[in-house]
DNA sequence: CGTGAAAGCAACATTAC
DNA sequence: GTAATGTTGCTTTCACG
């Protein structure tokens, strides 16, 4: 992977906002013609910088307005437990994010559900199947911002 | 918006995993032909259930391996302050998620940066520009799971 | 009337030059 | 960066329940 030039970063910025543009439109915006633009996008996909292309759905319309952040502590600090926990989380579609954290709590999860009752069901199932010593649930009242767009570095001095 | 049938939900599940499939391929997978499949996708886009189509980038390759969760408290509980805060957050590309929370802390942010030094710069800027009475930063050590795919409800009894 | 199938044209991605 | 070709998306038309 040869590092990105200004046009590559421009392409990435556009594509992470909207991937439905045609190559022609894309080429126009970055000041290229179709073929070289297509070759760059192709390269960005093969290199893995572009991981995937997805549709983002509207959680409210789907009836999933509730996001809950759960801070989880465990008392089993072994690699085996961590692997089993990760494998279990991967299977739960309600868990959209899960990070292993530094600090007081071992994991931070974001869980997306239809209502508080649904979260309660999820919660009971979770603590039944994995060994958790402490869990704190915090409900999101309002989504101020949520984006998949990463702050692409300008590329100087690296 | 007439509520979704099983095929619509199937289409959404496929598209939120991969939007690069052709209509033909998509039609095949759900057991339709091109035209009705295309019409359904069109309808899902116009209704807003499909919010947008985006490329997901690889944060590590881009040099952004660090996610920080910041819990923020304010002492100014007015609508004006909240609006100003939201507007400020919207302008900061490093802040990829921001939720107004129930519980001890007013806001939870996820900030994506290149390293700890970059977070420190971000942090200093943030507290300089908005009135914050308390902030706790928790660093993510490892991303166990991170998906944009929502758990689409089965559609029974709603 | 809502929903699906078939055919044609225009636009597009992709190949070689 | 230019030009040609095979695919695809999209429109129209028609048939079914």
Image (tube, coloured by chain):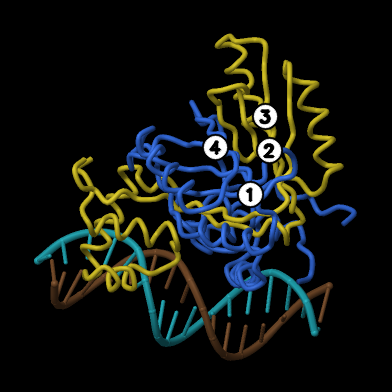
Chain colours: A yellow, B blue, C cyan, D brown
* Residue on which disc 1 sits: B99
Q: Do the residues labelled 1 and 2 touch (CB within 8 Å)?
A: yes
Residue at 59% across / 17% down in the picture? A82
In the rendered image, the quadrant that contains the N terminus of chain B is bottom right
Q: Do the residues labelled 2 and 3 touch (CB within 8 Å)?
A: yes
Q: Are marks 3 and 4 in contact (CB under 8 Å)?
A: no
Q: Is residue A19 above or below residue B56?
A: below
- Residue A49: assigned label: none
Spatial separation of the CA atoms under disc 4 and disc 1: 11 Å
Q: Quick one: label 3, few (<14), some, or many (20+) residues within 10 Å? A: many
* Residue on which disc 3 sits: A71
Q: Where is residue B152 in the image (x, y as percent from the top left)?
A: 71, 50
Residue at 63% across / 47% down in the picture? B74
Does residue A135 appear left or right of residue B123 in this picture? right
- Quarter of the view holding residue A142: bottom right
Mark 3 lies on a secondary structure that is: strand
* Residue on which disc 4 sits: B69
Residue at 70% across / 60% down in the picture? B8
Q: Position of residue A88 (x, y in %)?
A: 66, 25
- Residue A69: assigned label: 2
All told, the count of numbered labels is 4
Front one among B109 and A52: B109
Labels 4 and 1 positioned on one and the same chain: yes
């Amino acid at each position: 992977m040869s590092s990105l030039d200004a046009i590559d970063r421009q392409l990435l910025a556009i594509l992470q906002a909207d991937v439905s543009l045609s190559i022609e439109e894309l080429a126009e915006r970055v000041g290229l013609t179709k073929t070289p633009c297509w070759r760059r996008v192709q390269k960005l996909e093969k290199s893995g910088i572009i991981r995937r292309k997805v549709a983002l759905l509207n959680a409210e319309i789907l009836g999933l307005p509730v996001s809950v952040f759960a801070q989880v502590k465990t008392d089993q600090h072994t690699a085996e437990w961590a692997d089993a926990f990760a494998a279990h989380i991967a299977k739960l579609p309600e868990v959209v994010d899960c990070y292993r954290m530094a600090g007081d709590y071992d994991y931070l999860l974001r869980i997306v559900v239809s209502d508080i009752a649904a979260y309660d069901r999820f919660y009971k199932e979770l603590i039944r199947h994995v060994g958790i010593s402490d869990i704190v649930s915090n409900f999101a009242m309002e989504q101020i911002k949520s984006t998949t767009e990463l702050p692409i570095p300008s590329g100087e001095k690296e």
